[in-house]
Image (spheres, coloured by chain):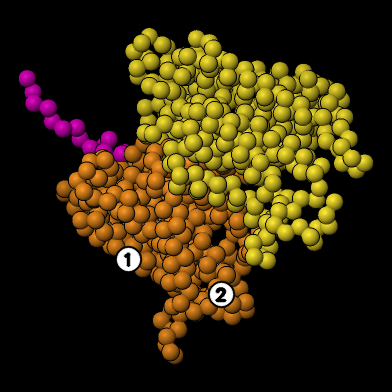
Chain colours: A orange, B yellow
């Protein structure tokens, strides 16, 4: 079988497993996978920036967290918010924020871009952390989950963990198809051009700033989708959701899976979660609880992975491929 | 002294409070300069972004705490700590950072972020997660009385003096010595400097170690005035990024100006209650003032006040 066919077959198999998973898995695992699907959406949105437009954003969690806060602040106390209004509102909040931040940060390049995206995300972090707007450092609870009712008909129930899982799966598929379409369009080709040589694209007559801004807003809005779903799933929003640790983790997911592949980063999210669970489950050793200090191992892993696996899993696949045959003497 | 109700827009209680805040702002800014000048030089000369730079501020503070406890004196702890951080920086460049020069910024961010996690957790294992305090050394524990009730601690003045001394020393090294000339050449054009016979590898290692040492020194001398706590390095790191964005990458002069600016904005932001049209802004919101300043600079000069156009 050709490698492409093999990949498609593997994908279909994974999709099939994901679709039937809630039928036999326990609640804990369904929720774990739902969390994973949500992170996969977030990782894909960052891949659009890093892998396709060459914009290394170190503040992507900001858009994820803000959508969660938008839901928490919009939802009335003790009453359920309406899904059909709160969802567009939360995603819209992320998009508007991405537009505002993008307007400033896209004036910079390279190292500056990394620093400035981090700084703006940190500004939002300190806004929610230091002020009492939304519970300060403790965060804010969403006591009653949004209700998705149209008239008398309720297509899905967000209190039901299986429904949340399928909603996340649905959005993951939707986001994937959407991003594929965007990247195949002329817009996507321009983005690829900007990544390789922005100056040349500008001299060809493309208003590169606008293209980058639109791309930044799309990525921010998709991160908002993920943030909304996360807020619904956990029923709580806290400043960690927009912190730089999450931004860095998502970056790692993108690199682990292989940037510029969309599905790779989704897989990277799964690997990342497995690593996190694995390191957190480490036993006691010599008086120190290794599981409590799991970030030590995560840090070590990040160092090694960036040194030896710069192209992620996709890179390993490339290494295992047979070398091109060289003509014999 | 005017009653507070009569103050309209900016409202300080009186001149002495203003003076104290001014001194605090300058001291904070100078401390920030110590950390950010190393970072900006490492950026400028090696093109490496170092997320773990703030960790050395934290490590310095914890070193001051543990060494002062073990050796019995802050004055012995200080030189020992300096030697330790310098050696650490030298080794780190040799073992890891060197591998990053040819890499994309993305990988530099991730690797140094990983390092930051390792440092933070190692600190947690070695020294725990509690907030620690370091005693102000006896020699500098006095206060200068300004009024009957207000006074200013000598130790804070000493911090400013040390920072100014280091800044002057840096200026002398950068402008008047051969090494400084080589560093400036490296910031301007690394390849060209290399091809003119300057050993850029050795120079990079020295600059990196020096930058780390400055961050460590800042942490050590700041330890007695502020609490020593986990995560203190990250707070400083992000402010350092703001300093570099405002001042311009690779510019020590820019780092000085921007550090002072941020020190003052941050300090006064916390005490000045700005009223706009009867709407009182929360003092908590003042932590955003620094970032708003950065946004304004980005619009005006995206490459920073003293940065060169790319």
Question: Which residue is identified by label 1?
Answer: A174
Q: From what the image shows, is residue A89 above or below residue B234?
A: below
Q: From what the image shows, is residue B138 above or below residue A78?
A: above
Tag 2 and tag 1, C-beta contact below 8 Å: no
Asked whether, in this view, residue A170 is left or right of residue A124, the answer is left
- x then y, percent, for residue A218: 36, 59
- The CA distance from mark 2 to mark 1 is 25 Å
Secondary structure of the residue carrying numbered label 2: loop
- x then y, percent, for residue B36: 57, 32
Residue plotted at (55% across, 47% down): B293
Mark number, residue A75: 2
Closest to the observer, A199 or B107 = A199
Asked whether, in this view, residue B243 is left or right of residue A308, the answer is right
* Magenta span dominant secondary structure: loop
Residue plotted at (55% across, 55% down): A124
Magenta region: A315-329
Closest to the observer, B83 or A236 = B83
Q: Chain of mark 2?
A: A
Q: From what the image shows, is residue B197 above or below residue B55?
A: above
Secondary structure of the residue carrying numbered label 1: helix
Structural crowding at the residue carrying mark 1, measured as other residues with C-alpha within 10 Å and reported as few (<14), some (14–19) or many (≥20): few
Closest to the observer, A318 or A223 = A223
For the residues tagged 2 and 1, is the chain the same?
Answer: yes
Say which label, 2 or 1, has the lower sequence index. 2
Q: Is residue B195 magenta?
A: no
Q: Is residue A328 magenta?
A: yes
Q: Residue furthest right?
A: B148
Structural crowding at the residue carrying mark 2, measured as other residues with C-alpha within 10 Å and reported as few (<14), some (14–19) or many (≥20): many
Q: Quadrant of residue A289?
A: top right
Q: Residue furthest left?
A: A329
- x then y, percent, for residue A259: 33, 45
């Amino acid at each position: 079988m050709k490698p492409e066919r093999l990949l498609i077959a593997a994908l279909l198999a994974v999709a099939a497993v994901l679709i039937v998973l809630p039928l036999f898995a326990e609640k804990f695992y369904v929720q774990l996978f739902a969390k994973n699907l949500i992170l996969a959406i977030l990782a894909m949105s960052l891949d659009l920036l890093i892998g396709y437009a060459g914009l290394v954003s170190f503040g992507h969690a900001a858009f994820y967290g803000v959508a969660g806060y938008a839901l928490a602040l919009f939802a009335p106390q003790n009453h359920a918010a309406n899904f059909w209004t709160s969802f567009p509102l939360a995603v819209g909040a992320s998009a508007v924020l991405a537009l505002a931040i993008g307007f400033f940060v896209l004036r910079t390049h390279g190292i500056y871009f990394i620093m400035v995206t981090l700084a703006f995300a940190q500004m939002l972090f300190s806004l929610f952390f230091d002020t009492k707007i939304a519970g300060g450092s403790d965060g804010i609870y969403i006591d009653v989950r949004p209700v998705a009712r149209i008239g008398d008909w309720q297509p899905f129930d967000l209190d039901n963990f299986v429904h949340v899982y399928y909603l996340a799966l649905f959005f993951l598929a939707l986001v994937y198809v959407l991003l594929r379409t965007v990247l195949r369009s002329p817009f996507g080709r321009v983005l690829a051009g900007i990544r390789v040589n922005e100056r040349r694209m500008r001299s060809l007559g493309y208003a590169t700033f606008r293209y980058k801004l639109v791309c930044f807003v799309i990525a921010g809005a998709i991160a908002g989708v993920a943030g909304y779903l996360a807020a619904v799933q956990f029923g709580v929003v806290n400043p960690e959701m927009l912190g730089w640790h999450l931004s860095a983790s998502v970056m790692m997911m993108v690199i682990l899976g292989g940037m510029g592949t969309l599905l790779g980063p989704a897989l990277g999210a799964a690997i990342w979660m497995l690593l996190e669970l694995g390191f957190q489950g480490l036993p006691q050793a010599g008086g120190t609880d290794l599981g409590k200090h799991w970030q030590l191992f995560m840090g070590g892993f990040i160092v090694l992975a960036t040194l030896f696996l710069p192209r992620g899993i996709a890179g390993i696949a490339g290494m295992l491929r047979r070398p091109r045959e060289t003509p014999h003497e | 002294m005017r009653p507070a109700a009569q103050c309209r827009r900016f409202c300080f209680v009186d001149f002495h409070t203003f003076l104290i805040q001014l001194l605090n702002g300058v001291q904070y800014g100078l401390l920030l300069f110590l950390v950010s000048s190393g970072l900006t030089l490492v950026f400028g000369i090696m093109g490496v972004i170092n997320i773990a730079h703030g960790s050395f501020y934290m490590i310095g503070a914890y070193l001051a705490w543990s060494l002062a406890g073990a050796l019995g004196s802050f004055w012995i702890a200080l030189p020992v700590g300096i030697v330790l951080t310098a050696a650490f920086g030298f080794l780190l460049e040799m073992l890891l950072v060197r591998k990053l020069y040819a890499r994309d910024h993305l990988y530099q961010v991730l690797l140094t972020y990983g390092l930051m996690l390792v440092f933070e957790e190692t600190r947690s294992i070695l020294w725990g997660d509690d907030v620690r305090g370091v005693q102000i050394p006896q020699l500098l524990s006095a206060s200068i009385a300004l009024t009957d009730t207000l006074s200013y601690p000598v130790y804070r003045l000493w911090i400013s003096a040390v920072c100014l001394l280091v800044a002057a020393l840096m200026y002398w090294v950068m402008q008047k010595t051969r090494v400084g000339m080589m560093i400036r050449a490296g910031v301007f054009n690394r390849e060209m400097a290399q091809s003119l016979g300057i050993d850029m590898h050795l120079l990079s290692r020295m600059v990196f170690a020096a930058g780390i040492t400055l961050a460590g020194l800042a942490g050590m001398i700041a330890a007695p005035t502020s609490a020593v706590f986990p995560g203190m390095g990250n707070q400083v790191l992000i402010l350092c990024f703001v300093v570099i964005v405002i001042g311009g990458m690779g510019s020590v002069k820019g780092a000085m100006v921007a550090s002072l600016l941020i020190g003052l904005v941050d300090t006064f932001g916390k005490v000045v209650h700005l009223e706009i049209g009867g709407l009182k802004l929360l003092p908590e919101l003042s932590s955003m003032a620094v970032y708003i300043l950065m946004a304004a600079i980005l619009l005006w000069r995206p490459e920073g006040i003293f940065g060169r156009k790319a």
